[in-house]
Every structure is written in structure tokens, then in C-alpha cells.
Amino acid sequence: MQAVAREKGLYEHIQFNTEVTDAHWDEESQRWSMLCRNSAGETRVDSNVVVFAVGQLNRPMIPTIPGVGTFEGPAFHSAQWDHTVDWSGKRVGVIGTGASAAQFIPQLAKTASELKVFARTTNWLLPTPDLHDKISDSSKWLLANLPNYSLWYRASMVMPQSVGFLDDVVVDLDYPPTEVAVSARNEKLRQEISAWMEPQFADRPDLRDVVIPDSPVGGKRIIRDNGTWISTLKRDNVSMIREPIEAITPKGICSVDGTEHEFDLIVYGTGFHASKFLMPINITGRNGVALHEVWKDDDARAYMGMTVPGFPNMFCMYGPNTGLVVYSTIIQFSEFTATYIVDAVRLLLEGGHQSMEIKPQVYESYNQRIDQASSLRAWGFSKVNSWYKNSKGRVTQNFPFNAVEFWRRTHEVEPTDYHLS
Ligand SMILES: Cc1cc2nc3c(=O)[nH]c(=O)nc-3n(C[C@H](O)[C@H](O)[C@H](O)COP(=O)(O)OP(=O)(O)OC[C@H]3O[C@@H](n4cnc5c(N)ncnc54)[C@H](O)[C@@H]3O)c2cc1C
């Protein structure tokens, strides 16, 4: 990224360590006015177009457990890791077993004297034997030296991944749904993954019931694994606690059965405020309407995850319902989104328009289609708790179709979808 920024002369356009706190649409000038704050104070920046590329998974979520903050030792969220803390020989409590926890727990377990993992639910593992393999020298040589090799290599990864195993998580209404499967294909995948996990429990059958999820594959974030997860849980110094947490105490964590687990360090692997899109920026569109009122706090919607009626010339990257979980990568989706936004700016410039605003009916029918499809995917159909859903249970995260569909709808802007002025 640094090389690209240097090569394309981007540095001179970037204001680092600056937070946008407020943005409002000015009808008279047909521009956005943004309030930017940094150590030097506040400044206003006006622009014809605003693109919010503020991510979804970077505002740490600490659960509202009684006693949070009373623990006397060090405690931090995985995204705010305190690198001054040495956990060697220490008793460590971890809350959470999601994608972040699955990556840092094996590292903590290597040297902690005792590690207890508090697990509300567990995740399916996707067998990925080469997960931690290094890229070989010969591959690196080919990528660097063989003309077009990197493009073919990329295509060989991207093409199958554009569809991934989405079909395995689609609900079949003719299949009698169970707690653990939404279709015959989904059940087959569950059995395949279970068969890969089973031998790993041969010497620890007690772990099977606490590790194998009781929800369908795809209901929650699937975690790629090469055997590291279960081998970590089998270590003598590691245990998994499925009792819900009652409170954080000055000495540790108290579970509902009344046990107080004492620790020297607590790490929160509790995820992010994923559904609170564009928080905490105050965004005001046409007629003084606040975006977060339109979105009712955590019920964000947008056309293609990018545009909202009443908020002209405003685009989001990685916006509502653009998460991808069983196919593609954020890189591909970000590229598609950027392509669309550039095309929108081109449309404004070449057409001599001052503003473009998505038509309400286009936005509504798109979101109806998203919600309908989401309810027929394992993550929307299953009652399992996940960060894909907002506080009302609506899926605000995932794009329920495949990446080819996203590309088809984003490779150019359809001008009739917009009011242009
Ligand atoms: C542990 C972890 C693992 C992940 N693994 C994968 C993976 O394997 N594959 C995948 O596809 N996705 C993965 N994701 C999802 C991840 O969110 C994206 O891959 C990626 O980081 C999103 O990029 P982004 O640029 O949209 O947002 P971010 O990387 O979150 O960047 C947003 C930037 O905007 C800045 N910002 C926010 N608000 C403001 C403001 N008001 N003013 C100014 N700046 C602001 C932030 O400081 C940040 O620098 C993972 C996420 C996490 C947390």
C-alpha cells in the first residue's frame, strides 16, 4: 500500500491522524461539508463527493458484562493489544472463540501457565491444510519473473472463490430443516467437516461436544483451520468454559455456576460494533435528515451497500450487506465497489451533473431482495447468535448472492437508477 501511495502520488492528498466527525450535505452549494479533527484542532473540508471507507470491523466491542473494568490486572480487546504485557507463565482468561480468538489463542497457549477460553458458541472449522504454509521460493520466483504468471495465478484463485460454497448454505425449503442443517448439501458439508474433526478428538472425546457447533455450517463465521485449533484446546494448560459469564471481578471472571476463575490477564476476543455502520460520524443529508435516524442506529441499508436516498453524492465502501463469508475476499469486493464509485464520479463529471441520488424505489426493491435472500441463507435462517445480525435479528452484514452477481451490478453505474441534477 505504501508503494502504491508513493507511485501514484497519493501521499500529498492524505491527511493522517485526522478523524471525520461530522458531514452534512449543503443544498445550496451541492457539496458535502466535513468537520475534520486532529491534534491541531478542527477544520472544514468541502467536497462534491464523499466516499466513506471507514471499514466495519475496527470499533472494538466490549460486552456489557457486570463488573467490566473492575479487573485489577491488565485487560484489553484483541484489536487494542497491549504489547507491553508479557503473558508467559501467567494465567490468562479469553472471552470469545471467533475468528480473532482462533488466531491469537494458539499463540497465548504456547507460554501461558493456564488459559481458559470462555465460549458462548463455537464455530465450524474449514479444513485448510496449507493455512500456515509459507509461499515457496519457486512460487515467489515465478510470480516475480514469469510474464503474466501472477495474473493467471490470481485468476485461478479468484474464479472458483467468486462462487465458493454459497450453494451449500442456501436453505432448501423442501428439506426438513433441523437445528444443524438447512439443506441436504448443507448436511453433507456438515458431515464432511465433522469427519475431518472427529479423528482429532480420538484422545479427547470430552472435547467433541464443546467444540462441534450445534448450528448449521454457514450460520456463523466459518474459521479456516489446519488442526491448530483442536490441538491447542487439547493442551494441558488450556480449557474451554461453556458456562455463561456472570461477572468480571477484581480477580478474574465469575461464571454463572458461581465459580470464580482467577487470572493475571484477560483478553476480549469479542468482536466489533459491526452493525453500527459509519458510527460515530454525524451524517446529515437532504432536508437535515440524519443518516443514523434513517438507519435506526444499527439497521443500515444501502443500494449495493453504497448509496442511500436523501444522501446525494455519498458512497460507502464495505457498507451494509457487502460482507462475504463463504466466497470471495474483501479485496475483490473493495475493487468492485471502487470501480462503481469511480464510474459514478465519471457520470457526474461527463454529464455536467451536480448531484446524483439513488431513486427510493431502486433502493427499496434491492433491499427487499437482499432481506428475502438473507432469510434463505444459513446465517439468516438459523437462530444462532452471530455478528451478521443486528439487534433486531436482521442480517446487515452479508451479501447473500455470489461475487459474480456483485460484479455484474457494480462494473458500471446504471444512470436510470439515479436522480441526476
Ligand atoms: C481479525 C480480522 C481478520 C479479518 N480477516 C479477513 C479475511 O481473511 N478476509 C477478508 O476478506 N476480510 C477479513 N476481515 C475483514 C476486514 O474488515 C477487511 O478485510 C478489511 O480490513 C476492510 O478494509 P477497509 O479498508 O474497508 O476497512 P479497515 O481496514 O477497517 O480501514 C478503515 C480505516 O478507516 C479509518 N476510519 C474509521 N473511521 C474514521 C473517521 N471517522 N475518520 C477518519 N478515518 C476513519 C480507520 O481508522 C481505518 O484506518 C478481517 C477482519 C478482522 C478484524
Image (spheres, helix red, strand yellow):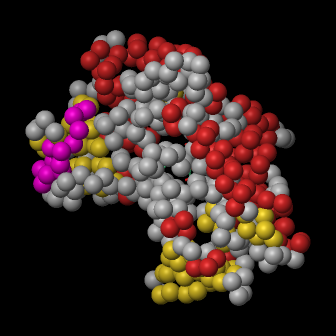
Which x, y percent locates residue 225? 48, 29
**207 or 293, which is in the foreground?**
293
The residue depicted at 51 percent of the width and 18 percent of the height is 176
Q: Is residue 406 above or below residue 81?
A: above
Which x, y percent locates residue 416? 84, 60
Q: Is residue 392 above or below residue 178?
A: below
Q: Quadrant of the C terminus?
A: bottom right
**44 or 105, which is in the foreground?**
44
Q: Is residue 107 visible?
A: no
The residue depicted at 47 percent of the width and 53 percent of the height is 274
Q: Is residue 107 above or below residue 308?
A: above
| Number of numbered discs overlaid on the protein picture | 0
Q: Which residues are magenta?
A: 241-254
Judge whether residue 245 is colored magenta.
yes
Which x, y percent locates residue 238? 25, 31
**Quarter-of-image position of residue 227:** top left
Q: Is residue 332 visible?
A: yes
Which x, y percent locates residue 249? 14, 52
Q: Quadrant of the N terminus?
A: bottom right
Determine whether, in the image, residue 66 is placed left or right of residue 191: left
Looking at the rendering, the quadrant in which ligand 1 lies is bottom right
Determine whether, in the image, residue 69 is placed left or right of residue 220: left
Judge whether residue 68 is colored magenta.
no
**8 or 26, which is in the foreground?**
26
The residue depicted at 72 percent of the width and 87 percent of the height is 29
